[in-house]
Image: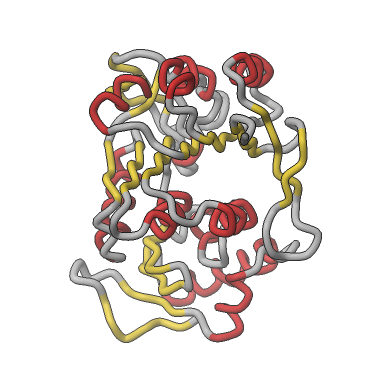
Amino acid sequence: MRLSRQETATGQPVIALNRFEQLAYRYPLRGKLRVSEPLIRRFAAHHGLASVIAEAPSGLLVLDLENRNDRQRLFGGIEQSVTNWLEANFKGLTSAWDIGAFHGEYTMTFARLCGAEGEVHAFEPVPDSVRVLREQAELNDMQQVKVHHCAVWNSNTDLEIFVGGERPQTSSIISNAIPQGGTQLVQAHSMDDLVLKLGAPEIVKIDVEGAELEVVQGGDQTLRDAKPTLLFESETWDSRRTETHLQLTSLGYELWSFARPRFGGRARLQKGTDGRMILAQHPRP
């Protein structure tokens, strides 16, 4: 890594990866993030950096170097094997939604798959994350990305969200079991209501820290009629994960989970729900 001489219009420093680091970025090698993270922390401490713009093979990334997930994104991120799978299997998308977008790992993947003619809607309730999403879309000239400052729920209402403090990616409407940074009032909409305004997506990624069931409930009509592919987080600590799975299978969806790649590359799909990330699709004719 090196500091680039250029800065953004807002004065943020820009860092660039060397050729070896760019090569390492492209492959989700086992142990890569565990090895690279302390290197990034030392680099940030040496240069006195808290937030930067990073020139990565996937585009310009807005990174908070005090946040573990963001540090890992500098070398591909924890979802890289799944986003690699998406890029190989969902070329030619025209519309995609990222519900619980955080800092846009999936948003940027969808933007590349949809291209300039497509449309990507990112939904995020935490103001700091909304700022990052909008800045990142602007830096990469991703005009197809529309960022919505709201939560997605089973109805249209105002909700209190538990904010994740030093770990904003853990912000949740459901509980404050993880050390939090207080609460905020957010506007929430159901998926069905949003579809009336934005049109139905082809694929929806959902990562809402335990509120996946409510998102699915609020999209019942959309899931019956438009039948979008769903990619959602299903953590074992979520006591209602089975209820979410049953709700989807009752709507005709088949559920698959992602197994870790044997060596780099893309994640592998396996029938069932053993993995953390689940793909839900209607059977293809």
Question: Image quadrant for the C terminus?
Answer: top right
Rendering quarter of residue 235: top right
In the rendered image of this protein, does residue 151 appear above or below residue 1?
above
In the rendered image of this protein, does residue 249 appear above or below residue 112?
above
Q: Can the viewer see residue 5?
A: yes
Name the foreground residue: 218 vs 117.
117
Residue 102 x %, y %: 42, 44
Q: Residue furthest front?
A: 285
Q: Residue furthest right?
A: 262
Q: Residue at x 44, y 55 (%)?
A: 92
Q: Residue at x 68, y 26 (%)?
A: 237
Total marks shown come to: 0
Name the foreground residue: 82 vs 169.
82
Name the foreground residue: 102 vs 113.
113
Q: Can the viewer see residue 186?
A: no
Q: Is residue 54 left or right of residue 13?
A: right
Residue 284 x %, y %: 62, 36
Q: Residue at x 66, y 28 (%)?
A: 254
Q: Residue at x 61, y 20 (%)?
A: 252
Rendering quarter of residue 153: top left
Residue 267 x %, y %: 69, 53
Coloration mode: secondary structure
Residue 123 x %, y %: 35, 37
Q: Is residue 242 left or right of residue 104?
A: right
In the rendered image of this protein, does residue 222 appear above or below residue 16?
above
